Image (spheres, helix red, strand yellow):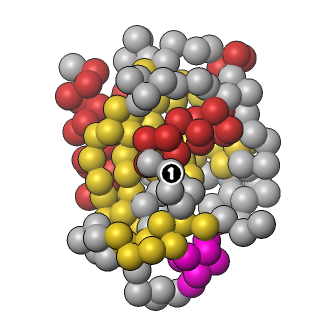
Amino acid sequence: MEEKLDIFTREGEYLGIKTREECHASNPGFYHKPAWTWAYNSKGEILVQKRSMQKKKFPGLWDMPCAGHVDAGESPKIGAIREAKEEIGIDVSEDEMQFMFEYIEDDAWEIGQVFFFKTDKEIEDMTIQEEEVESVKWLSFEEFKKILYSDKWVPMDKEYKDIVVEKFVEILG
């Protein structure tokens, strides 16, 4: 059964439900709200994932540790929690999953709902979804910034990357 997603105007006004395929058509005329989730630990390290070579878009590039569509009727926070469990095997409570900001990606017709959560789970204790994720690793903040702004990272707006870095500076001190 095809995924169904809630759709919105660029200003965030709810319009109804469409299929994932309709949302990913070129110039659909409406937006959807995926959950984009970042993780950090007590050591001030940031978790990143290497995308599976099976992925249609950007295989083998580094990316945020979990991201995905929010099902129709599901809250973005619950979608972020579900994706963390599915993609990297980490259970995150609603209290631990912190909404940070919203980012509009006009080219993709997306209003990204950006979340951060803290976990001290070791890599060997994570269960990765192999069709989505090749591997995960913890990076120091400096290593993270270096790879984030490199061609080894999935294409993202510099403005978005800058906001993510700024938010990590606020959280990590």
Residue 52 x/y as whole percent: 73, 49
Residue at x 61%, y 74% (from the top left corner): 19
Q: In which quarter of the image is residue 140?
A: top left
**The one of 61 and 128 positioned closer to us in this rendering:** 128
Residue at x 38%, y 23% (from the top left corner): 95
Q: In which quarter of the image is residue 164?
A: top left
* Vertical placement of residue 14 versus 141, above or below: below
Q: What element carries label 1?
A: loop
Q: Is residue 153 visible?
A: no
* Vertical placement of residue 21 versus 114, above or below: below
* Vertical placement of residue 23 versus 150, above or below: below
Left or right for 65, reference 87: left
Residue 110 x/y as whole percent: 41, 68
- Magenta highlight range: 18-25
- Image quadrant for the C terminus? top left
- Image quadrant for the N terminus? bottom right
Residue 62 magenta: no
| Label 1 crowd (10 A; few <14 / some 14-19 / many >=20) | few
**The one of 33 and 125 positioned closer to us in this rendering:** 33
Q: Mark 1 = which residue?
A: 74
Residue 20 magenta: yes
